[in-house]
Image (tube, helix red, strand yellow):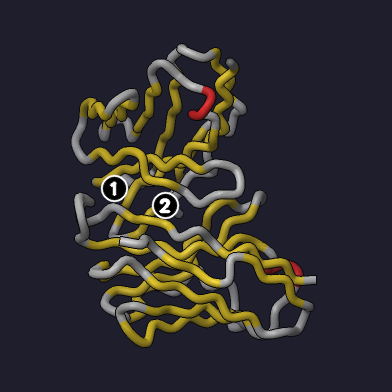
Amino acid sequence: DAGVIQSPRHEVTEMGQEVTLRCKPISGHDYLFWYRQTMMRGLELLIYFNNNVPIDDSGMPEDRFSAKMPNASFSTLKIQPSEPRDSAVYFCASRGVSGRSHYNEQFFGPGTRLTVL
Amino acid sequence: QKEVEQNSGPLSVPEGAIASLNCTYSDRVSQSFFWYRQYSGKSPELIMSIYSNGDKEDGRFTAQLNKASQYVSLLIRDSQPSDSATYLCAPETGNQFYFGTGTSLTVIP
């Protein structure tokens, strides 16, 4: 399995622009998580999905952030409009039964490093 | 507010020594516990999971769990320079992982 795939790996944009981050979870995994990591706040859970349905979005910082999961193999995290304080590394992670993993073991993608100027 | 406390370090140990990483958590409901290793500029990588009180060994790694004390630890035996990274403790409650801020470990050759 290719693992969790994220794109783009790096994104530099200007304040006010729309940013869309993409994630493909591990095939067969039924949970998908979006995290944000900064030096100041560490790793924060933004939102997670189960079977494509958003379960808890209480970590989404404000209405500028939105996430969708239209099918089991694709999710997006959108920021509109972006602000400099959104600069961080955004990770997608998935969880489920695959290979040798225990059901509730969570695996991270490589992350998207977002810089908002 | 579910809190996970880790000593931020940096923790420095000589090559070949035992590195001991500690974590306390506030949510008594947590049943599953995970240790992730994160190299600088990389994503967290799962290295250990533990679900029952006691010790669990996997190669040079040993996880220890004491639910009564709400304490979980990770021991790394025969530490190698390649173990230099940040180690994140993550209890799970209700399908959510609550990550500590991590302990930075440096293994000195």
Same chain for the residues at labels 1 and 2, yes or no? yes
Residue drawn at 40 percent across, 62 percent down: A93
Where in the figure is residue B71, as x and y percent of width and height? 35, 32
Specify few, some or many for label 1: CA neighbours under 10 Å numbering under 14, 14-19, or 20 or more: many
Q: Is residue B87 above or below residue A58?
A: above
Quick check: marks 1 and 2 in contact, CB under 8 Å? yes
Label 1, label 2: how many angstroms apart (C-alpha)? 10 Å
Q: Which residue is mark 1?
A: B30
Residue B98: mark in rendering: 2
Identify which residue, A54 or A96, lies in the foreground: A96
Q: Amino acid at mark 2?
A: Tyr
Residue drawn at 48 percent across, 44 percent down: B100
Report whether B33 appears left or right of A74: left
From this viewpoint, which residue is outermost toward the front?
A2
Q: Is residue A65 above or below residue B75?
A: below
Q: Is residue A91 above or below residue B2?
A: below
Report whether A53 appears left or right of B13: left
Dot 2 falls on a residue whose secondary structure is loop
Where in the figure is residue B53, as x and y percent of width and height? 20, 31
- The answer to which of marks 1 and 2 sits earlier in the sequence is 1
Identify which residue, B47 or A59, lies in the foreground: B47
Residue drawn at 38 percent across, 54 percent down: B97
Q: Amino acid at mark 1?
A: Ser
| Chain designation of label 2 | B
Where in the figure is residue A81, as x and y percent of width and height? 69, 84
